[in-house]
Image: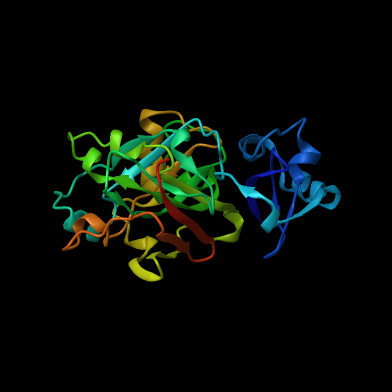
Amino acid sequence: MKLASFRHDRTASWGVVLDAETIADTGSVLRSAYPDLKAAVAAASHQEIVAAVAQAPRHLLTAIEWLPVIPNPGRILCVGVNYDSHRREMGRDALAYPTIFTRWASSQIGHQQPLVLPRVSTSLDFEGELAIVIGKAGRYIPAAAAFDHVAGYSCYHDGSVRDWQRHTTQFTPGKNFPGTGGFGPWLVTRDEIVDGEPLRLTTTLNGEVVQDATTDMMICSIPRIIEYCSSFTPLEPGDVIATGTPGGVGAARQPPLFMKPGDIAVIEIEKIGRLVNPVAAEA
């Protein structure tokens, strides 16, 4: 099942993507119980959603504005340098633990919405990633039980404002400019993908492949990430974990390759979908 958050006629809702052209507005049917996709992920059953699809209005995908898959996550946890190819190109030492930093929900945008190059930088870099959405709360989750806490998966563009990221050893400023976190287009539920199945991830910029890897190349696996993160913070339904980007980022190239207004960035993950974001200058 593909679940998405969107806006139609100025009303935010969520629904089930039925095919390449249509979405069922299940949020309009279930709004009193599940006002947004975060609430649905937390408590709605598969049967409730399927029943709501039968009653829900249909919208053309061309008639909606895509929102970040989870517009209001309680936590966005990001894993840094989690592919050896990226670790090496950034000159980072191998570490025994995952490198974790955070994003704010206000930095996120949906599918087809513009990534924003801030006026104080010319160094907006691309980073394609697999995102996990948590579906079941937990603390101190053992790796062996980690997938039971996963609602599903999405594409994430963890755009980096590199010069601000490098002002200090802390990543926070360079990872939280508004309009730099692409998230979408939808959530593919866990039952659609075999736990731990390698998925091909590619990033293209203006049609040129700039990143190409499979998710089994991650240094820290999904179970390891969930085990580690749930040890320092309780995980709640709707929380998002971006699992890291492979090698090929613009900052590591000679000369550097940064995104500029007019570019089109695409993150594609096998069995999940394509997240497309144009690039625009900050107004």
Q: Which of the 4 image quadrants contains residue 31? A: top right
- Tell me where residue 109 appears, x and y as whole percent: 50, 44
Q: How many marks?
A: 0
- Tell me where residue 181 appears, x and y as whole percent: 43, 44
- Tell me where residue 249 appears, x and y as whole percent: 27, 58
Between residue 202 and residue 110, name the one nearer to us.
110
Q: Residue at x 34, y 41 (%)?
A: 118
Q: Residue at x 15, y 49 (%)?
A: 92
The N terminus lies in quadrant: bottom right
Q: Which of the 4 image quadrants contains residue 167? A: top left
Residue 270 falls left or right of residue 65: left
Between residue 239 and residue 113, name the one nearer to us.
113
Q: Residue at x 29, y 51 (%)?
A: 82
Q: Which of the 4 image quadrants contains residue 250? A: bottom left
The C terminus lies in quadrant: top left
Residue 136 vs 204, above or below: the answer is: above
Residue 252 vs 223, above or below: the answer is: below
